[in-house]
Image: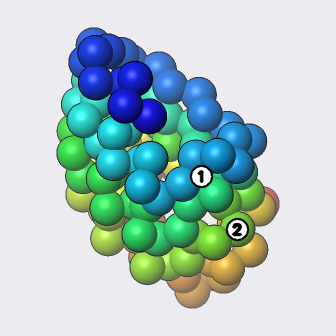
Amino acid sequence: MNDLKDVGNLRYLHLAENRGITNDGMTSVGTLRQLRYLNIGACDINNQGMVFLPNLVNLEYLNLSYCNRITEKAAPYVQKLNKLKYLDLQGCIKINTGGLKKFEKKGLTIYKP
C-alpha cells in the first residue's frame, strides 16, 4: 500500500475482494484526502481498519459489503464522513438491525438488504 503515497489526487479506488488488504494497509488509504469513491468490500479488515476513514474528507461512496469482521463499532468513523452519501453494508453479518441504526444519518443512503 506504500505505492499510494504518490497518487494524492486519486478520486476512485476499488480494492474489493482483496484478502491481502488488512488493517495495517488501510492507513495508506487514509492519506488519499481527495478520494470520493472507495470500495473495500470483502477485504480482510475489521473495526480497527476503519480509523483512517475520518481523513477521507471528500468521500461520498463507501462500499464495505461482505467485510464480515466489521461491526457497529465502525459506525463512529463513518459518522465523521460529512460528505458521505452512500454506504453499502450488504453481507456484513455482524451488523444487525440495532447496529445499523448507529450508521444512520441525514442524507446517507445505506444498502443492507
Type of the residue with mark 1: Leu
Is disc 2 placed on a helix, strand or loop? loop
Q: Is residue 14 above or below residue 63?
A: above
Residue bearing mark 2: 68
Q: Quadrant of the C terminus?
A: bottom right
Mark-to-mark CA distance, 1 and 2: 9 Å
- Residue furthest toward the front? 2
Mark number for residue 64? 1
The image shows residue 31 at horizontal and vertical percentages of 25, 35
Q: Secondary structure at mark 1?
A: loop
Q: Is residue 103 left or right of residue 110?
A: left
* Residue at 43 percent of width and 79 percent of height: 73
- How does the figure colour the protein chain or chains? rainbow
Q: Is residue 60 visible?
A: no
Q: Position of residue 5 (x, y in %)?
A: 28, 24
Question: For residue 104, what is the image quadrant?
Answer: bottom left
Question: Which one is in front, 86 or 47?
Answer: 47
The 10 Å Cα crowd at callout 1, few under 14, some 14 to 19, many 20 or more, is many
Q: Nearer the viewer, residue 57 or 106?
A: 57
In this rendering, the answer to whether 71 lies above or below 61 is below
> With 69 as the anchor, is 46 left or right in this view?
left
Mark identifier at residue 105: none
Residue at 73%, 57% in the rendered image: 66
Q: Estimate how packed mark 2 is, as few (under 14), some (14 to 19) or many (20 or more) residues with alpha carbons within 10 Å.
A: many
Cβ atoms at labels 1 and 2 below 8 Å apart: no
- Foreground of the two, 112 or 14: 14
Q: Could one spot residue 95 in this view of the protein? A: yes
Using the image, determine if residue 101 lies above or below residue 61.
Answer: below
